[in-house]
């Protein structure tokens, strides 16, 4: 692979995603109830909840940059190639075991990323580290 930098969109937390789904469906329910009972306060509150859904989804975005020196992420910072022990992929989740931290680094890849690009990035990670 001849690319110097590979950028993959990822999520910071699964909890934010779950909270986002719960808020969205509750706001949808409140919107329907507000329309049925003709209550403008309920509709306004549900609109505020829709804005919260957009803000939470915006804050939950992260970017994983793979380049010559290592991997850079907003959540974990810069991790050099020498610090890696093992890299595993399970569906849309990358688990990276390092010498620096006890727990593996869990990177959740965003659904908007193409599967082919994710596979290329994973193969590049493995070839770069020779794991």
Image: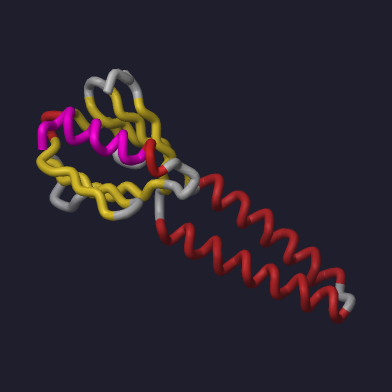
Determine whether, in the image, residue 127 is placed left or right of residue 114.
Answer: left
Q: What residue is rendered at 79% in x and 64% in y?
A: 44
Judging depth in this view, the residue of 111 and 30 nearest the camera is 111
**Magenta-drawn segment:** 118-131
Q: Is 126 inside the magenta-drawn segment?
A: yes
> How does the figure colour the protein chain or chains?
secondary structure
In the figure, 34 relative to 76: above or below?
below
Residue appearing at x 55%, y 50% in the figure: 57
Residue 99 image offset from top left, x and y in percent = 10, 41
Q: Position of residue 96 (x, y in %)?
A: 20, 45
For the question of whether residue 19 can be seen, the reply is yes
Tell me: residue 78, above or below residue 97: above
- Residue lying farthest to the front in this orientation: 116
Q: Give x and y (percent) for residue 7.
A: 39, 30
The residue that appears at 32% across and 47% down in the rendered structure is 107
Residue 86 image-quadrant placement: top left
């Amino acid at each position: 692979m001849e690319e110097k930098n590979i950028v993959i969109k990822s999520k910071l937390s699964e909890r934010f995603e779950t909270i986002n789904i719960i808020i969205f469906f509750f706001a949808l329910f409140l919107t329907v109830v507000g329309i049925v009972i003709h209550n403008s306060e309920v509709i306004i509150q549900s609109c505020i909840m829709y804005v919260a859904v957009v803000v939470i989804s915006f804050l939950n975005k992260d970017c994983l940059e793979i380049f010559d020196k290592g991997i850079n992420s907003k959540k974990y910072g810069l991790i050099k190639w020498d610090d890696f022990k093992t890299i595993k992929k399970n569906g849309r989740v990358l688990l990276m075991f390092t010498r620096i931290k006890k727990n593996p680094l869990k990177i959740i890849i965003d659904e908007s990323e193409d599967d082919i690009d994710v596979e290329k990035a994973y193969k590049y990670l493995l070839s770069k580290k020779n794991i």
